[in-house]
Image (spheres, grey):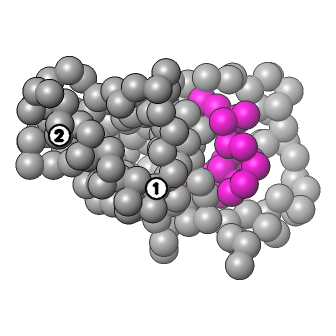
Amino acid sequence: MSSPSKRREMDMMKLMMSDYKVETINDGMQEFYVEFNGPKDSLYQGGVWKIRVELPDAYPYKSPSVGFITKIYHPNVDELSGSVCLDVINQTWSPMFDLVNVFETFLPQLLLYPNPSDPLNGEAAALMMRDRPAYEQRVKEYCEKYAKPGEGSEDKSSDEELSEEEYGSDDEDDDDDDVAIAGKPDP
């Protein structure tokens, strides 16, 4: 077994031992899903996202590919593909980092400190800079609609586009029902 292969196996085991739910794709160790909880004290607290991870053959010398399967409203996450804009993964990756770093540090930091000046979702970045309360409300709406724990978040993935009616209904629908429960995790 080659060194990168052993490292891949070790990092996967560390991730699973850190209480992350990991689901392999095609019974291999190169592609898998991880259940990721929104960080405490953030707009994303209480949400659960399915993250797709792909480890290149050269891992850990080459960074993993990480993307949200579950829809998320964030300036640095492409709304349609789920791709993540995160320098530490895309540009400054080091073999010193491992998968636990990605889920315990890098992704929580991304959600806690969005960077609207380097967006993948231009609409979210513009709304964040122009109208912070409206941006925060949209984040909470997405959490409530797509990232509710225990509801099979893969059913509402970033691969699916909202219909014109469904997309428009967020702006036109003034029901206070969604607002009253948005962002409040179950005990």
Q: Position of residue 120 (x, y in %)?
A: 40, 31
Is 137 in the magenta?
A: yes
- The amino acid at mark 1 is Tyr
Q: Is residue 94 visible?
A: yes
Vertical order, 31 against 36 (above or below): above
- Observer-side mark, 1 or 2, equals 2
Vertical order, 45 against 16 (above or below): below
As measured in the structure, the alpha-carbon distance from the residue carrying label 1 to the one carrying label 2 is: 18 Å
For label 2, the residue is 7
Vertical order, 146 against 176 (above or below): above
For label 1, the residue is 20
**Residue occupying the far front of the picture:** 1
Main SS class of the magenta portion in the image: helix
- In the image: residue 113, left or right of residue 134: left
Residue at 87%, 46% (x, y): give it: 173
The quadrant the N terminus occupies is: top left
- In the image: residue 141, left or right of residue 49: right
Q: Where is residue 113, by image quadrant? A: bottom left
Vertical order, 25 against 117 (above or below): above
User: How many neighbours does mark 2 have within 10 angstroms: few (below 14), some (14-19), or many (20 or more)?
Assistant: some
The quadrant the C terminus occupies is: bottom right
| SS state under label 2 | helix
Residue at 71%, 35% (x, y): give it: 156
Residue at 64%, 32% (x, y): give it: 157
Q: Earlier in the sequence, mark 1 or mark 2?
A: 2
Q: Position of residue 35 (x, y in %)?
A: 52, 49
Return the mark for residue 132.
none
- The amino acid at mark 2 is Arg
Residue at 29%, 59% (x, y): give it: 105
Extent of the magenta region? 131-158
Q: Position of residue 52 (x, y in %)?
A: 46, 33
Pick whichever, 104 or 33, lies toward us: 33
